Image (cartoon, grey):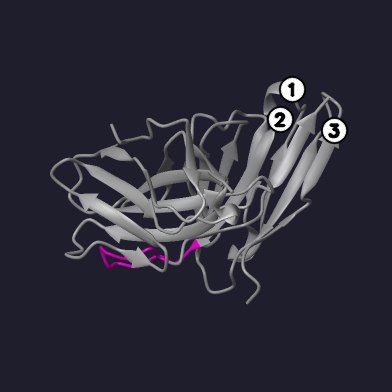
Amino acid sequence: AQKITQTQPGMFVQEKEAVTLDCTYDTSDPSYGLFWYKQPSSGEMIFLIYQGSYDQQNATEGRYSLNFQKARKSANLVISASQLGDSAMYFCAMILHGSGNTGKLIFGQGTTLQVKP
Amino acid sequence: DTGVSQDPRHKITKRGQNVTFRCDPISEHNRLYWYRQTLGQGPEFLTYFQNEAQLEKSRLLSNRFSAERPKGSFSTLEIQRTEQGDSAMYLCASSLAYKVSSANYGYTFGSGTRLTVV
């Protein structure tokens, strides 16, 4: 069965420092993608970064990078130079791309990040 | 294009009442999804439409829940005889249906409807 595991319920980071949020996944499908979303207290899901299972390079989007280790089935999010506005809930999610898949996302439990001034 | 819109943003209802939520996806997106998110948890898939056809329903979608997407445009999610356990954030998302294996399909979420059943 497909599953996403986020083992860190809460994390603290000092402003301007880097932080890594962990995500491991489980699937036997060879074609899949991994997302990271940010959810502030207002509730909207903000897309941060995406990594496809066949992508050769790790994805980067500004201060966000995804440390994709396929053999270990991990897709950790690295946020560099943390800002106070980064304080939010962060979700890792998986999509299966194979034929017959509907494109629904499977989410982890989330990690609450608090950035200290 | 203004993204995915959901209405209302907040809804408070009494137990036993019916409620209906609306989602307007990005216009060129042919796939539409509903998710439910309870406090402190990740979103869980409820149902999926490709154009106007409802192609998958989760076991979470009890017979009190019904979703429609007439003409493949906006979608509605109705909950009949609401229960306190229905209190949650209901998120809508839309995407394109590509055949490319490595693509994020433009997956976009709305701001959600927060339902409180009292």
Residue at image location 34% in from the left, 59% down from the top: A65
- Examine the rendered structure and indicate whether residue A88 appears above or below residue B49: above
The percent coordinates of residue A102 (x first, y second) are: 39, 51
- Count of marks placed on residues: 3
What residue did someone put label 3 on? B13
Asked whether A112 or A32 is in front, the reply is: A112
Q: Residue furthest bottom?
A: B1
Residue B62 belongs to the span the image colors magenta: no
The percent coordinates of residue B60 (x first, y second) are: 54, 30
Q: Are marks 3 and 2 in contact (CB under 8 Å)?
A: no
What residue did someone put label 2 on? B87
What residue did someone put label 1 on? B84
Quadrant, the N terminus of chain B? bottom right
Q: Amino acid at mark 2?
A: Ser
Q: Are marks 2 and 1 in contact (CB under 8 Å)?
A: yes
Q: Which residues are magenta?
A: B95-105
Q: Secondary structure at mark 2?
A: loop
